[in-house]
């Protein structure tokens, strides 16, 4: 069973259930039909026995010379095809007929005079009819002695038994012979074999069995088709998941239904898409990690190499001129400062990635922060002869955030704008409110601009657009990466529009 396919298990389970149901229905139907037929036979025999008892009662009270008891039994015997016994008031058999016996043809009628000495005769009469039937109750009736008590009390009696004498299944009916006065003056006992019923039932069983077999075969075909339609999408899902496991994240399940299996296929497709996206992000993250390690190594190695080279030159006595020594020491100091700035930026970036500042959020006045940042970059703008304009707006709502981080964010953007704007240019820091109610902070310059191919990467660590200029300014290429982390921390939206030679416009929206 463990090695069976899912389809085989489904077919086996369905066929087992159907077979059990069909057998149960067959058995129940058979018992119902048999009981119904036997019940109808009992009712029919009881009715005919009652008619015969009435005729015998009339015959006993008003004997007719041309009619004998044998005639009455003979007519009823032909009609019922049964064994009929007639008993007198003393429970002695006065006549009997064995019609319908499977062992042979018609039996012998016997009797003694009844009702005024009238004897029994007719075609079933014993030769020399009219002679009494000697002896006690015959064995065929002796086993019903107790039931005869019920009949002689004036009650009807019927039962389906295996007859102890005839050794076959029979319907036995007992009907009292009641005179007009109400006195019970005998009984009619009818023994009718159920051979015909059993023969009919065998035909019924045969047809039901054929129907059951046909039903099982048809069910097998239908179940095969049904399970195949159920298993087919499952096999497709198996193939798809196998392909996904091997790295084919573009594999998809063909979905043509809206049921549970269809929804499962949709979930697998969504899982494949999410997994594919995750693997792309993972690959990108891994590349960024390798690039980050390489860039950090490079950025750290450069100042360390300079510091080591100049310090060894001084210590080895290679350089003896005091002015040259002072120049070397200044280079060592500058590179140490740059190294310190790099390490500080890396630590700052790490802190932002842990979202530690989110716990310090409070309502902040962006207009006040904007004016403060303008004051910080004012000296550099004056040195480069750049016009710095501050437009904080009026009566603007506050935003939730970390003041220190917001100052750091705007200072990075404003400082970059001043650094990359030539003398005679302008930098504008403005604040306004959108129609949706968000605060829009804009940093716009007339600087060198950013090429379109570089725009998607300006937020990455150590990415440098103007490497020569950036080197002169001592930047490590982490400013915008830090700015991006602060933007994400405050759940703000950012857009950058830039044109080489025309300047850059950066817009921040705080909800």
Image: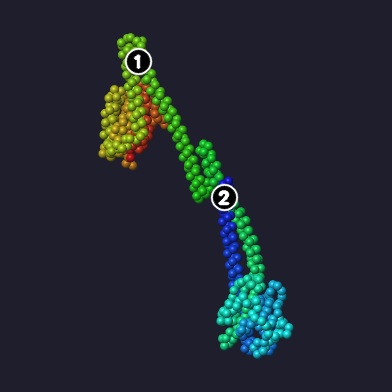
Q: Quadrant of the C terminus?
A: top left
Q: Is residue 231 above or below residue 457?
A: below
N-terminal of the two: label 2 or label 1? 2
Between label 2 and label 1, give the one nearer the viewer: 2
Residue shown at the point (45%, 35%) measured from the top left: 281
| Residue 72 image point, x, y percent | 66, 83
Q: Examine the rendering and report whether any part of residue 182 can be seen.
A: yes
Q: Regarding mark 2 in the picture, which secondary structure is present there?
A: helix
Residue 419 or residue 82, whichever sits in front: 82
Residue shown at the point (62%, 78%) measured from the top left: 189
| Residue 309 image point, x, y percent | 37, 15
| Residue 113 image point, x, y percent | 67, 87
> Which residue has dot 1 on it?
311
Residue 458 or residue 126, whichever sits in front: 126
User: Neighbour class for label 1 at 10 Å: few (<14), some, many (≥20)?
Assistant: some
Residue shown at the point (69%, 88%) measured from the top left: 66
Q: Examine the rendering and report whether any part of residue 385 can be seen.
A: no
> Which residue has dot 2 on it?
9
Q: Is residue 494 above or below residue 216?
A: above
Q: Is residue 360 left or right of residue 123?
A: left
């Amino acid at each position: 069973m463990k090695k069976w396919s899912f389809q085989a298990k489904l077919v086996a389970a369905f066929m087992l259930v159907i077979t059990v149901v069909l057998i149960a229905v067959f058995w129940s139907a058979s018992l119902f039909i048999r009981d119904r037929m036997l019940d109808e036979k009992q009712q029919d025999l009881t009715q005919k026995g009652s008619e015969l008892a009435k005729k015998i009662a009339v015959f006993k009270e008003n004997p007719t010379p041309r009619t004998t008891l044998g005639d009455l039994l003979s007519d009823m015997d032909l009609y019922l095809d049964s064994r009929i016994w007639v008993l007198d008031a003393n429970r002695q058999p006065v006549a009997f007929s064995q019609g319908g016996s499977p062992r042979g043809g018609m039996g012998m009628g016997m009797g003694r005079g009844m009702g005024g000495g009238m004897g029994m005769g007719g075609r079933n009469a014993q030769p020399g009819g009219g002679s009494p039937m000697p002896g006690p109750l015959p064995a065929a009736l002796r086993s019903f002695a107790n039931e005869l008590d019920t009949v002689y009390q004036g009650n009807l009696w019927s039962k389906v038994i295996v007859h102890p004498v005839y050794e076959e299944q029979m319907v036995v009916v007992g009907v009292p012979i009641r005179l007009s006065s109400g006195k019970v003056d005998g009984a009619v006992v009818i023994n009718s074999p159920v051979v015909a019923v059993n023969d009919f039932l065998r035909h019924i069983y045969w047809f039901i069995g054929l129907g059951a077999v046909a039903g099982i075969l048809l069910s097998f075909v239908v179940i095969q088709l049904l399970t195949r339609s159920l298993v087919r999408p499952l096999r497709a899902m198996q193939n798809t998941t196998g392909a996904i496991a091997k790295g084919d994240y573009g594999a998809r399940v063909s979905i043509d239904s809206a049921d549970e299996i269809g929804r499962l296929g949709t979930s697998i497709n969504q899982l494949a898409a999410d997994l594919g996206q995750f693997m792309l992000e993972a690959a990108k993250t891994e590349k960024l990690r390798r690039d980050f390690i390489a860039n950090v190594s490079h950025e750290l190695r450069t100042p360390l190499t300079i510091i080591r080279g100049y310090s060894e030159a001084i210590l080895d006595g290679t350089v003896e001129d005091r002015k040259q020594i002072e120049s070397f020491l200044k280079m060592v100091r500058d590179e140490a400062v740059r190294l310190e700035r790099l390490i500080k930026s890396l630590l700052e970036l790490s802190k932002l990635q842990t979202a530690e500042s989110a716990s310090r959020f409070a309502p902040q006045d962006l207009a006040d922060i904007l004016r403060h940042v303008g004051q910080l970059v004012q000296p550099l703008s004056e040195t480069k002869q750049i016009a710095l304009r501050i437009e904080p707006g009026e009566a603007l709502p506050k935003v939730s955030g970390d003041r220190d981080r917001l100052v750091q964010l705007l200072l990075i953007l404003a400082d970059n704008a001043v650094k990359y704007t030539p003398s005679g240019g302008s930098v504008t820091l403005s604040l306004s409110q959108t129609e949706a109610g968000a605060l829009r902070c804009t940093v716009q310059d007339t600087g060198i601009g950013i090429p379109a191919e570089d725009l998607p990467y300006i937020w990455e660590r150590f990415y440098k657009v103007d490497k020569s200029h950036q080197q002169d300014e001592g930047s490590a290429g982490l400013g915008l990466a830090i700015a991006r982390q602060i933007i994400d921390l405050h759940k703000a939206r950012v857009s950058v529009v830039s044109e080489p030679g025309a300047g850059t416009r950066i817009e921040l929206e705080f909800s």
